[in-house]
Amino acid sequence: MTTGRRASGVASLESYLAERRRVVEEALDRLMPPADAPPARLHEAMRYGVFSGGKRLRPILAIAAFELAGGSGSGVLTPACATELIHTYSLVHDDLPAMDDDDLRRGRPTCHKVFGEGVAVLAGDGLLTLAFQVVAEDDALPAERRLAIVQKLAEANGPSGMVGGQVADVEAEGQEPSLSTIGFVHSRKTGAPIAAAVVVGAIAAGAPSEQQAALASYGERVGLAFQIADDLLDVTGTAEEMGKAVGKDHERGKMTYPGVVGAEASAARARELVEQAIADVAPYGERAWALEAIARFIVERRS
């Protein structure tokens, strides 16, 4: 893995993201079972979910944190890919009729529309458990770092993290909007997994605890900004930009930041969180350029 270098302008961030996306996708292809390996239907569905044109934001954040913390070599790649496997599992399950009942994801039919609900459930299960398997088996990192990564991913994506946030999100549908409830949902559903992706990169690099704490704070704030931006895009974006139906949050009575404080205040809050996140990593100077640029990209994106 080459280390990050500061470069100016949008083109430099685009090239940084494109190169690391390529590296991540090559690693994902190596780590996942072949599509024709028995049971082929399951592996085909898992690959369909993973290779559907995602931004690979979480693994790229892991790589950027690894680079900031002085990591070298390819030891971050498997943990970074694990964050994407977990993220994809969450999307496959989130799209199911029992959850958001979405027909499209990134401009393609959702996994359950192609493979059926049963296989989609099992494909998500397979991706989640594969994430922990590949980290545990990766001898590119010392055992204690692998254990710390597994613990961080489990905590951030389990009952006290993403899964708990998803339950709170479902329970809040149709309820009186509350900023405290939205904060609870966002911090667990999106903030915790994104913060974990950043911290995973720091752990892989052997970063000291104070550096891990700064990166965790950065990740939490970026995660919250990402969710607010996502909620805004559901209001202001188009189906063509998003690759899925828009306006569904309002239809389902979901509790969102724009629904409580309006679009303008939501955008201002997202920008504020990004500036706070950038301040978290500013002491690391040039080494933080990629994390700073990604934070700004999160609130400026249109999909």
Image (tube, rainbow, N blue to C red):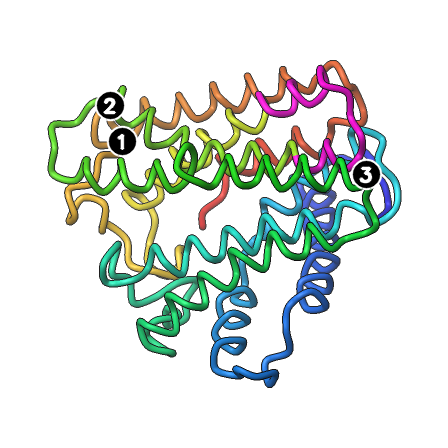
Image disc number at residue 32: none
Q: How many angstroms separate mark 2 from mark 1 (CA)?
A: 5 Å
The segment highlighted magenta reads: 200-217
- Residue drawn at the location 47% of the way across and 24% of the way down: 271
Q: How many angstroms separate mark 1 from mark 3 (CA)?
A: 35 Å
Q: How many angstroms separate mark 3 from mark 2 (CA)?
A: 38 Å
Front-most of 301 and 65? 65
What secondary structure is marked by label 2?
A: helix
Q: Residue 21: horizontal and vertical position, in percent?
A: 68, 55
Left or right, 239 with reference to 301: left
Q: Main secondary structure of the magenta part?
A: helix
Front-most of 178 and 236? 178
Residue count near mark 2 (Cα–Cα under 10 Å), binned few <14, some 14–19, many ≥20: some
Cβ–Cβ under 8 Å for marks 2 and 1: yes
Quarter of image, res 93: bottom left
Residue count near mark 3 (Cα–Cα under 10 Å), binned few <14, some 14–19, many ≥20: many
Cβ–Cβ under 8 Å for marks 3 and 2: no
Disc 2 target residue: 261
Quarter of image, res 149: top right
Q: Residue 52: horizontal and vertical position, in percent?
A: 52, 66
What amino acid is found at the position of numbered circle 1 in the picture?
A: Pro
- Residue drawn at the location 64% of the way across and 19% of the way down: 213
Q: Residue 296: horizontal and vertical position, in percent?
A: 57, 32
Q: Residue 99: horizontal and vertical position, in percent?
A: 26, 54
Disc 1 target residue: 258
What amino acid is found at the position of numbered circle 3 in the picture?
A: Gly
